[in-house]
Amino acid sequence: MLHRPLFSIGEVARQTGVKPGALRAWEASGLLVPERTPSGQRRYGPEHIERIRRIDHLRKILGYNLNAIRTVLDDPHGPAGNAAAAGDRPSSGPDLATRLRALRRERQLTVRELARRAGVAASFISMIERKRATPSATTLTLLAHSFGITLGELFGSTVGDPGPVVRAGTGRVVTDLSPAIEIEQIHVGLGLMDSEVWTLAPGAHSQGSYAHSGEELVRVLDGTFEIALDGGAPVELHTGDTIHFKSEREHWWRNPGDQAARLLWVNVEPGRLLPGARSTEPPYDQLVRACSPPDAVLEGRGPDTTQMRLSLPPGSRAYRYLDTHTAGHPTRIFLDLPGPLPAGSVRAQRDAFRNTYDRLRSRLLHEPRGQVATFGLFPVPSDAADFGAFFISSDAYLDMCGHSIIGYSRALESWGLLAGRESFTLETPAGVVTVQVERTDGDLTSTIFNVPCRIEAMDLPVALPDGRTVSVDIAYGGCLYALVGAEDLGETLEPERSTALMFLGDAVRGALAAGGRQVSGVLFHAPTEDGAATRQFALLKSNTFARSPCATGMSARMAQLHARGMLALGETYIAENMLGIRFTGEIVEAGTAADGRRTIRPTVSGEAYISGVGTLVLEPDDPLPEGFLCR
């Protein structure tokens, strides 16, 4: 009996050229129903691939919206299906790439000049114009603002005046924004008002907050829509609900439902009455609009101060972030990539970032905008998992960072991107990990199912510069650690000993390097007074130690204990930092690597908390543009 071939979502994406995110959106919209393995993994047969190519053709070539595609697929011989077969396409006018290039040349702007105005990487604008990148709604709004036009006008005004009546389905369809978002333009650029019907696939969102002049009204025609203003709590709207607000207010939005949402979106731009009066301030001005002088300074200075806001020199750059801390160790999650990264694995994207944008590592994490212990996390797309992210520190690019993953899990929950789910997958440079989340009275505990970990060497005698010799084990827990018993050196793991421990750890690492062994860090361990846990102190580099118990170091420690027969499968391991905050671990799987070495799959559980949101600013004449680091 011949078996029908089945393919994973990644394999289908490579065969058809349709991104996994679009495939998931089509599935959520009911256009595509893959098969499922017993474990829940999607599988696609030849008939699915044929349907995917048909959907892609209807969207990209014929310009049909999701509802029209559904009609064609359900009734290929009906009027819509016949029109599709005949190659009819709604009048769409110039595509976004052509329109953007024409506007830029009309205003005699170079790509670099437009990039400076919009705060977008010049290479990214070039990619858009060459149809090799798809910008978010936030980026497009910034570009439109730089031209002094509305988002609707950036896509191109509706051709001519269709009159007071526009029949259903006859509006101009725009699909340049995202596979998950389509816009049917009704009246655009004919007066003060732009009117559009937006269709958002489940999970579609603005990819950041933005603001502009004017006011807008959104009415939900079908489904669910969520919007937040000025960084406040999001408001969920349902069919028939309407929201009206000033567009100067920072706003972000998304479709939190499991069905497509249809919205009537109306923008009113009073500035059209005054030719040449529109603002073309760069986007950092939007980000710092709320930074007005404090009331204590303004008191008694009269009504003219009510419009005061922060003013920055032209050419200033802004970098938005969300801060979390995990057991005291900070993670700075950057909300914008500096430009496009090539498609591929998260490791490949991380390496491309290092090759192209490495200056941002010191600019964003060194003083005066950061500090030596801050870790950075950049969210990136993933074809292999629900989310992707890579990690940077002030002097290195890490393959894995457990405390940052716990912090990112807290951020995803706060953004509503987990939507009540109990687990998600995250692709890191070290591989794909699963993260389970447990919610208790508003708290979120995240459990990382780490990559396979292993012991590398045991009982290595290491001679220190002071003449002492200490026995060291080396183990991999996502990063490579030298493991040292603090008691073997007569040390206690107390906060007041942190400086001495950093000197000792640096000596251990230096001695190992002299012998040809390189490690990412040195983990000191000692039992707590009650014997219920192990206290850990991880030196990460010569002047930095982990404030948390260190999830990767903890994983390496569990691999060491398992190799020594001191921690069995299913047993709990508890580690705490010098502040007494604990992570909980467990070995959930034991196996053998391809090279024959024994491995374990550990879990690490901990909590993180939102500690700040903000925007870092680099003024053009700052004498320390790349920052500095005191060692």
Image (cartoon, rainbow, N blue to C red):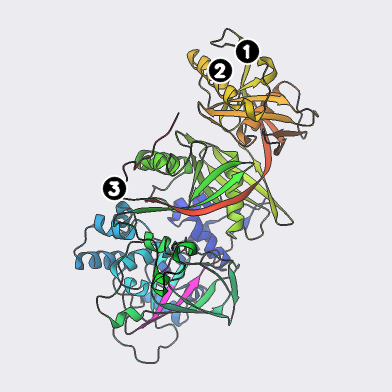
Amino acid identity at mark 1? Val
Q: Which residues are magenta?
A: 183-212
Which SS class for mark 2?
helix
Residue 330 percent across, percent down from the top left: 56, 43
First in sequence, mark 1 or 3: give its number.
1
Q: Which mark is residue 508?
A: 2
Please name which of the two marks, 2 or 3, marks the residue nearer to the observer. Answer: 3
Residue 8 percent across, percent down from the top left: 55, 50
Q: Residue furthest top?
A: 467
Residue 276 percent across, percent down from the top left: 24, 75
Q: Magenta stretch containing residue 185, yes or no?
A: yes
Query: Is residue 592 visible in the rendered structure shown here?
Result: no
Given residues 627 and 263, the one toward you in this image is 627
Given residues 353 and 279, the one toward you in this image is 279
Q: Which residue is mark 3?
A: 621
Q: Residue furthest bottom?
A: 164
Q: Which mark is residue 101?
A: none
Given residues 158 and 514, the one toward you in this image is 514
Whole-angstrom CA distance, mark 1 to mark 2, is 9 Å
Given residues 247 and 219, the one toward you in this image is 247
Residue 526, above or below 321: above
